[in-house]
Image (spheres, rainbow, N blue to C red):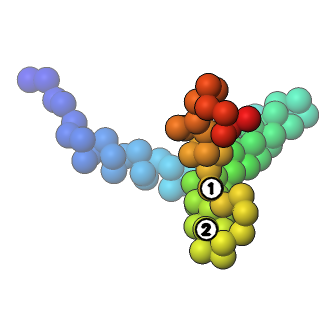
Amino acid sequence: MNFQPSTSCKLLTGLTAAAFPVMAFAYVGPGAGITAIGSVLALLVGIALAIVGFVWYPLKRYFRSRSGKPGAENAADKTAGASTDDPKNH
């Protein structure tokens, strides 16, 4: 008879092993340590900039359009219908 552990049994075993770690007695050199720290910081900065890009810039554009300041329109909107043959655009 071949025993196959269920997914919940595997998950419970994994969580138990992660909850009670054993000391590894491993050495992490200065180069690997700096690389690991730099990678984690780069990941955090990337996530923060993604949030800023997806949240802040649309809000900034919205507030500019409400205040009526020049430059609120998107540059692509200004040139979307513009033709190079049209004398009004020169």
- Work out which residue is located at the far bottom of the displayed protein and give it: 67
Which residue is identified by label 2?
65
Q: Residues within 10 Å of mark 1 (few under 14, many from 20)?
A: some
Q: Horizontally, is 8 left or right of 78 in the view?
A: left
Residue 38: name its quadrant.
Answer: top right
Which residue is identified by label 1?
73
Judge by depth and name the residue closer to the eye, 76 or 35: 76
Q: Are marks 1 and 2 in contact (CB under 8 Å)?
A: yes
Q: Horizontally, is 3 left or right of 51 in the view?
A: left
Amino acid bearing label 1 = Glu
Q: Earlier in the sequence, mark 1 or mark 2?
A: 2
Q: Residue at x 25, y 47 (%)?
A: 8
- Work out which residue is located at the far right of the displayed protein and give it: 30
Q: Residue at x 33, y 46 (%)?
A: 11
Q: Looking at the rendering, in which quadrant would you find the C terminus?
A: top right
Above or below, comparing residue 2 to residue 23 in the picture? above
Q: Secondary structure at mark 1?
A: loop
Location of residue 27 in the rendering, given as x and y in whole percent from the top left corner: 81, 33
Above or below, comparing residue 69 to residue 25 in the picture? below
Location of residue 15 in the rendering, given as x and y in whole percent from the top left corner: 42, 51
Q: Horizontally, is 63 left or right of 28 in the view?
A: left
